[in-house]
Image: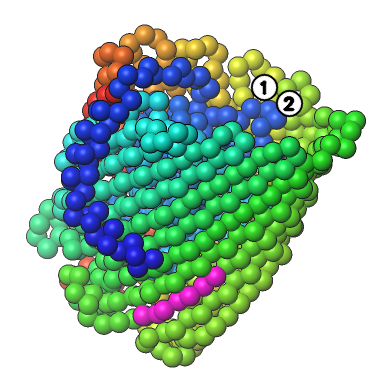
Amino acid sequence: MDALLPLLIMYRRYSPWLFGTALCWCAASTYAHDLASIVVTGHYSNAVSSSDAASQGVIGAELLRNRALLRPAEVLEFIPGMVVTQHSGDGKANQYFLRGMNLDHGTDFATTINGVPINMPSHGHGHGYSDLNVLIPELVSHVAYRKGPYFASEGDFSSAGSADILYRTKLDLAFVSVTLGQRGYVRGVAAGSREVSEGVTLLTAVERLNNNGPWTTPEGLRKINTLFTLSGGTPKESWSTSFSAYAARWYSTDQVPQRLIDAGTYQGQPFGRFDALDPSDGATTSRTSLSGRWQRSENNLSSALQWYAIKYDLDLYSNFTYALERPSDQFAQKDHRTVLGAKAFRTWRSDLGSDRLMLNTLGVQVRQDQIRVGLYDTAQRQIQGTVRDDQVRQMMMGVYGQNELNWHRWFRTIAAIRADQLSAKVNSQTLAENSGQVSAFKLSPKFSAILGPWNKTELFFNAGKGFHSNDARGMTARVDPKTGLPIDRVPGLVSSSGQEVGIKTEIVPQLQSALAFWRLDFDSELVYVGDAGNTEAGRPSKRIGIEWSNHWAPDDHFLMDVNLAWTKPRYADNDPAGNYIVNATQRVANLTFALRNTGLWSGSIGIRYIGSAPLIEDNSVRSTVSLTSNLRVSRRVSKDITVAMDVLNLTDRKNNDISYYYRSRLRGEPLSGSEDVHIHPAAPRTVRVNARVLF
């Protein structure tokens, strides 16, 4: 992986040149081609006979063209019940919520882009850290999502769900897209593809983004992103190889206490929702990957192989408690790693006659992370002391077997078992007692039964065991790195179990509906607290919920998507502190209304509702409701030019992206500090204008 470092250095140095070259190259390529016809299927492909669970589906590219997005990761918000917010700078991984779980930055939700995993285990800021700022939405072909631990191909981080984001390997026409917005927002994307030899296509894309945001301390986000993909083959056998390079830097305005916002002043100066208490907070990050995939289908046999190599770096500076422990409570979290991994599967198809068909699949997955990860006390980004400094090497290997048997054209079953082995070695540079070598093993059986379709209706029953891994440092630690007190080690793999009953129907013409009743239990909600440098063992938990999704397209001009989710999350044991799970969002709704194919004009409005959530276990303090509406209006100026305007947070509501309840201390307050709600405000009304030109 060290061989990739010179490429990354050249990429950072010559990124403006790369962007300009891509603009010229796109203009010169595929100019004479006509735009291929597009079959409009709406936002979702959740039709009957298309999945193995009512909560499984596919998000199409139509969605990304028709609806306004504030951040790249919001492509996941079209998964029914999913919420994507932010509690820090926009270059940082987002905050995710699904099925009554505060997924933090990605724990228990697995995400891949072109088969390359985004989640980072044993990460400096939080286990499972999933930074989707590397995503270029314009290139997305589709997003395949699954919820619940019922799918044998999904391993670590997938108990709540998973999403596979697949890019296009070929564009019908090259394009240049430029977006200008308030508060220093400038984004440019150029992409195109061309045949470089017979049957081989090269796709090139470059993205550049500058943004200051609504913050009193300008965010100064600077992001550069490139992608090169070679692909070729036939429908029976195809391959692709991709090189991706991403880098970003920013200053962040982290969450602030509600008592300070209510007071309106701090140390004699006005203080508002968008002010910062430590303007030096922020980060730099980079991610470079080389990956490939190969697949073949012939007769009754299909095979696939994917591999990847990743070089990743993050230097993050945060201050959430201000002056509670020191004159400045700022801390740095550093994560520098290389990742190597691969996955493969083979499926055998057998025709048993009399409408009976059997599919047997065998798959294997392996991933190795070599990490240097640290936690440091800092002030103004200057290191004052070392809390933790560790070298971590960990490997995860998974093997699964699955049998799908079509007993009849209206009944099939899927039975599977998955085995996972985790091995980790931690070499602590600060406390020898926290070094060690550990391993863990977990078996996860799965079962699904699908009945139908009858009258364009299918019934589903799903059940399965899953798991999430824990931070390797928590598996070997014996001593709290801050207090020096003994602490208990935590298990490497923690079991989850889930059940779901659902229905999909198209009995009403042009309306796709899905309804799922589900339950998800965890033996222990183990979370590595990167801000403290250790792992806290949580209590056992149980969640039950209902999800209802609807996609209605009565004609070619109008579509409506309505997704509703309700969850009851609780700790499963009895404790005087209370049984409510902190930051477990209980009600989520997403509504989209779109007009299309009406001539020169088209438009959509999206409405997102996030219900109140408990902020402490006894439910005595709760977050406020968030209601956001986003408007997009676009006009086709000519065959090759389209102009669009996005109005984000249309009604300019004072929403909060996230709320926490904890102790902090402002300068001048008693040394013990104060328990308070701390919020990170959502962006105010924001207008952005985009021009897209096809070549």
Front residue of this view, candidates 395 and 41: 395
Whether residue 543 appears in this view of the structure is no
Q: Position of residue 146 (x, y in %)?
A: 60, 44
Viewer-closest of 303 and 312: 303
Q: Amino acid at mark 2?
A: Thr
User: Which image quarter: residue 691?
Assistant: top left
Q: Secondary structure at mark 2?
A: strand
Residue reaching furthest to the front: 198
Q: How is the image coloured?
A: rainbow
Q: Is residue 3 above or below residue 589?
A: below
Residue range corresponding to the magenta coloring: 388-395
Residue 81 in picture, x, y percent from top left: 53, 41
Q: Does dot 1 land on a helix, a strand or a loop?
A: loop
Q: Which residue is mark 1?
A: 506
Foreground of the two, 474 or 543: 474
Q: In the rendered view, does 348 fall on the left or right side of 22? A: right
Question: Relative to residue 251, is residue 639 drawn left or right?
Answer: right
Q: Which residue is mark 2?
A: 457
- Left or right of 666? Residue 421 is right
Q: Residues within 10 Å of mark 1 (few under 14, many from 20)?
A: many
The disc, 2 or 1, on the residue closer to the chain's N-terminal end is 2
Q: Is residue 518 above or below residue 439?
A: above
Q: Are marks 2 and 1 in contact (CB under 8 Å)?
A: yes
Q: Residues within 10 Å of mark 2 (few under 14, many from 20)?
A: some
Residue shown at 55% from the left, 13% from the top? 554
Instruction: Tell me where residue 631 sits by quadrant.
Output: top left
Quadrant showing the N terminus: bottom left
